[in-house]
Image (spheres, coloured by chain):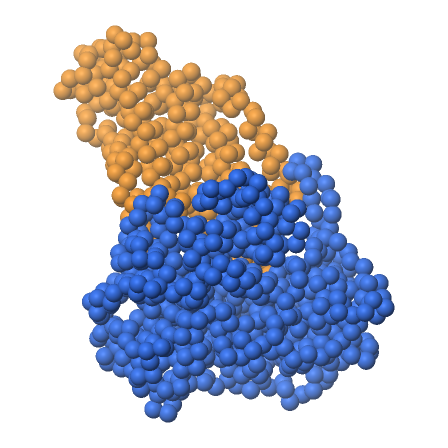
Chain colours: A blue, B orange
Amino acid sequence: MTEENSVIAHDPSATLSVRDLKVTFPSEAGAVEAVRGVNFDVHPGEVVGIVGESGSGKSTVALAVMGLLQNSARVTGSAHFKGHELLGLDDKALSQIRGRSVAMVFQDPLSAFTPVYTIGAQISEAIRIHQDVTKDQANARAIELLDLVGIPQAKDRIRSFPHEFSGGMRQRAMIAMAIANDPDLIIADEPTTALDVTVQAQILDVLETARQATKAALLLITHDLGVVAGTCDRVAVMYGGRVVETSEVYSVFKQPQMPYTIGLLGAVPCLDAGVGEPLIPIEGAPPNMVNLPDACPFVERCPIAIDVCREREPGLDETLTSTTENVHQVACHRSNEIVDGRIDGQPVFALPELGAIAHTAIARADREVVIDVKDLIRQYPVRKGAVLSRRVGTVYAVDGVSFDVRTGEALALVGESGCGKTSTVTEILELRKLKGGSVTIFGKNAAELSKDEKQEVRRNLQVVFQDPQASLDPRLPVGDILAEPLKTHGMPKEEQRPRVLELLSLVGLEATHADRFPAEFSGGQRQRIAIARALALNPQLIILDEPVSALDVSIQAGVLNLLTELRARLGLAYIFVAHDLSVVRQTADRVAVMYLGRIIEIGDTDDVFNRPWHPYTQALLSAVPIPDPVRERERHRILLTGDQPSPTVHYEGCRFRSRCFRYQALPEDQTQDCRTLDPSLTDPTGHNLGHEGTHGAACFHIEERDVV
Amino acid sequence: MSRWQLVWRRFQRNKSAIFGLCVIAVLFIAAFFGQFITQWSYDQIDANAFLKPPSTSHWFGTSQIGQDVFAQTMRGLQKSLIIGFLVGVISTGLAAIVGATAGYFGGAIERANLFVISLLLVLPSFLIIAIVSPRIRGQSWLWLVVLISVFSWMLTAMVVYNLTLSLKQREFVTAARFMGVRPFTVITRHILPNMASFLIIDTTLTVGGAILLESGLSYFGFGVQPPDISLGTLIAAGTGSALTYVWLFAFAGSILTILVLAVSLVGDGLRDAIDPQSEAKASL
């Protein structure tokens, strides 16, 4: 198949034309074939998305084209930029092109700037390297660029150092630097992955402005199908180091013909689904890129694999629906049998069955309260000086949070980074004396527990952390990891092993896995192990701290389904912390949205998602991209101005006021309350929200709005 | 492939480290079995050979009173090796306990442990050992091991302390804590095993330092006391005639140099093989 690929000539009209690109890295286990023959074109003014999960080789493609890979990587093939070969150029020749005709925007804008120079100096340096202008002219241009990307008071901010900018502002400055020399092509490698969702919306907006200002083509590399749906003209889906499906964006989303694409689209949690609805996971893990056999790389995970899939790797061929204007290529032996995500009338990926959640039969008010948190406060001192440190301020991380969770219920705490959601749950888990407020857990006050009572509470309260790589001790075999809680809480030795095996099967792993080490498992399997450990003692409440945010979409779906299923089977209660709203849509019964250390809206999931009251919730929901290009492009996005303000200051009045679009739109005489009073959770009539579990928002001007 | 297999493979690629390992193995075998391949024992006196240069019957020559230098050197090497490895194990163990408890518990324990560490760091160890050693004269040489250990663990403890501080933040430690696991179990089960690589490297490097320190002390008469022999006492006895009767001094001196060099080579090799920082270098 590679022979066919190599004969395809470069497209002379394309800005960037990549042919048969292959990248190999040496490793202890053998050569890692990270990229195995990739072809694509980026035409002038076009936005091309390369989408894939971690390890698919998408970033390597970009780095290889720019000549930024480590020296040990072996790169073959050809990449023409406006007719000139890029691969094999020496660093000096490439520097002439990099930054001038081709600009890059990286994922982490902090490491892309030198910390010791001001932002302005770095942007004008970029200008002066490639253009013959004076220092003042370059400076003036830098201000102009910062202004274009939406940095307020660009004239003053130009003298700021990178650390004085927030993540979102740094990424704006990065984009300003990228377009400084009017490039023909911008390569953006996961430009919004490290950012919060409301900031992501701003940055995508800025990227679009920048593109229009320069008329450059954009190569967008991302794992987020929602971002692709909203921005790209054409998409290439990568899997196992190859492009497995490519076409114009609408046809990929509407008529995907590669099972992997179909699975990926089904696995994305969606804002408009219902509570308890299952996601469609893709079983298994991506292939190991060493010594790949001549077979379809997706064959192990593909539900419709046939013999030929194991014998020969399919080439990237045009499908029946492909036309000359809209070329649709798919690397699948059975692609022509697939129509509308179905094969022989059956969906390629069957919807899994999940058990019904038992407690729904009993009214919420009649169920037992598992945990009751009232006015919880958590503050961190800000210290200065290394030897004689003194307190110079306070971070009000959690500033009066109240909620309760009842038997069998899943409450989601959502919010952007720095909103205090993780501080809230760690404060609960510490079971110590509080700075303010109270935590009543299983009917007992957490601050006044005796040593034995504490151990009893710990038995019933378990936690699953974000990163399964970090939360499992790498030196212990899985069996020992799972036995640890059993041993700690005094289970006789001979009963431990059977329980460990039972737990493994409960989370869908095999008994033989008990003797392996965490490093031998994929991310999804590791998270299953962490969940099994949390279940070991039959707890009543599990705190899930971002349990899927470190996982790829296809794996994430399986873990979310498992969580839903376990809750139904074992009657567990969850506190589910997440920054991604779509993740909790199908998993949680109730949602609490946090902003600056406070819950600003709480209610049943359907209410909060379908009828959000608080302006922040509305902005947050509208910023989450939906993986459907038609709907995504029709949505009206509420763009918040600025970043989340500093949590070291106590605000008078409503804490969201500084970014609130409703406040800005109100006439002066109606904003009195917003400026002077701290809103509590109420319904639209102003009734204070009790604990009866209804919907409430901390806003004086509640107004319903459909944003999904 | 397991982690240690990987480490071993990388270690094997390092030729000088393998060389060092072979040298140590040879010296070990010689030190403990050397006495069986020569007819002479270290405390035996050959009345027919005083100050004889190396020959077929006395491979390293003989001393002023007719002792076989080969047998003596092997005996001394044996002592030096034992002292070196004991000090390596004891001081690293001590460092692990003090550093890890300081880092894990914090508060008063942290301050107390750090105070002891800083105090011992500023004391001139060589002088103190020199002053204390006359008091232990005539007692077991194990006291010397204790003394050297007491003064060689502090820097390691500081590193262990800092590693503990960062491991304490890791989620598997937090997870164990929230599970209700007892603090000492957390340290021995989760914290120390995760710095095993550092501890192993450190033990190796301490061995070299301890052998040198012991030799230095013995040279000045503070270390191993007669009738025990170490490489240091041999060198001390031989220095007077270093230029006239070279064999009295040269063999003990060069074996000491070779031993310490070999230990350092192995230590460096281990560090390169275990430390992920050197991974990129190894793959080129």
Query: Please, which residue is most extreme toward the left here?
Result: B56
Residue A648 visible in the picture: yes
The vertical placement of A569 against A33, above or below, is: below
Q: Residue at x 45, y 27 (%)?
A: B144
Q: Please name whichever residue, A249 or B174, is drawn nearer the observer in this view of the structure.
A: A249
Question: In this rendering, would A390 be left or right of A342?
Answer: right
Residue A185 point in image, percent of width and height: 42, 58
Q: Please name whichever residue, B21 or A595, is drawn nearer the observer in this view of the structure.
A: A595
Residue A325 point in image, percent of width and height: 36, 77
Instruction: Indicate the quadrant where residue A137 lies.
Output: top right
Residue A31 visible in the picture: no
Q: Residue at x 71, y 76 (%)?
A: A613
Residue A252 point in image, percent of width and height: 41, 77
Residue B154 point in image, percent of width and height: 52, 34
Question: In this rendering, would B207 be left or right of A310?
Answer: right
Quarter placement of the C terminus of chain B:
top left
Q: Residue at x 36, y 37 (%)?
A: B267
